[in-house]
Image: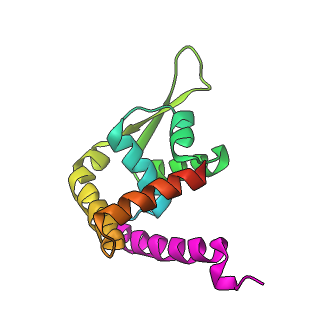
Amino acid sequence: MIHYEDVILFSLSKANQQVHRAFKSGLQPFGLTPVQGLVLHALYTEDGLAAGEIGKRLILDSATLSAVLERLEEGGWVARTSGKEDRRFTHVFLTAKALEAREPFLREVGRINGEVLGTLRPEERFLLERMLRDLRG
């Protein structure tokens, strides 16, 4: 019988808890949750994305994404606009608040990422990232 600590679910769950805790703590001064931080990061990469495209890129279902966008909008981080031709397509834009916080936010995300992965050698980091992508499908 396989020991519970050798079940991949256990290992990934425990690793996820540690990473989530690190990002939750690091993003708390910004008033952001880890998922809100991911959405903001996607918009820092490409502002004005359609909401559906954000969901696709971050692999978030529409209900989760809608709630996250609502909180970001309430917090003054993003503004949503509907297309003139087709109101079903909502685009999300960074606000002045988000643009002002860009550099400190990205620095903090980089710091947390480095801290989480800091115990790994570069080749181990590369392999871990590749294996996780493979597991995601």
In the image, residue 43 lies in the stretch drawn in magenta: no
Count of marks placed on residues: 0
Q: Horizontally, is 28 left or right of 60 in the view?
A: left
Residue farthest to the right?
1
Q: Which residues are magenta?
A: 1-30
Name the quarter where the N terminus is drawn: bottom right
In the image, residue 13 lies in the stretch drawn in magenta: yes
> What's the residue at 64%, 80% (across, down)?
6
Q: Is residue 67 visible?
A: no
> What's the residue at 36%, 35% (across, down)?
47
Vertical order, 21 against 60 (above or below): below
Q: Is residue 122 visible?
A: yes
Q: Horizontally, is 118 left or right of 62 in the view?
A: left
Which of 4/89 is in front? 4
Q: Horizontally, is 96 left or right of 63 in the view?
A: left
Q: Position of residue 78 (x, y in %)?
A: 41, 44
Q: Position of residue 96 (x, y in %)?
A: 28, 43
> What's the residue at 46%, 62% (across, down)?
34
Q: Position of residue 48 (x, y in %)?
A: 40, 32
Vertical order, 54 against 112 (above or below): above
Say which quarter of the image contains residue 106: bottom left
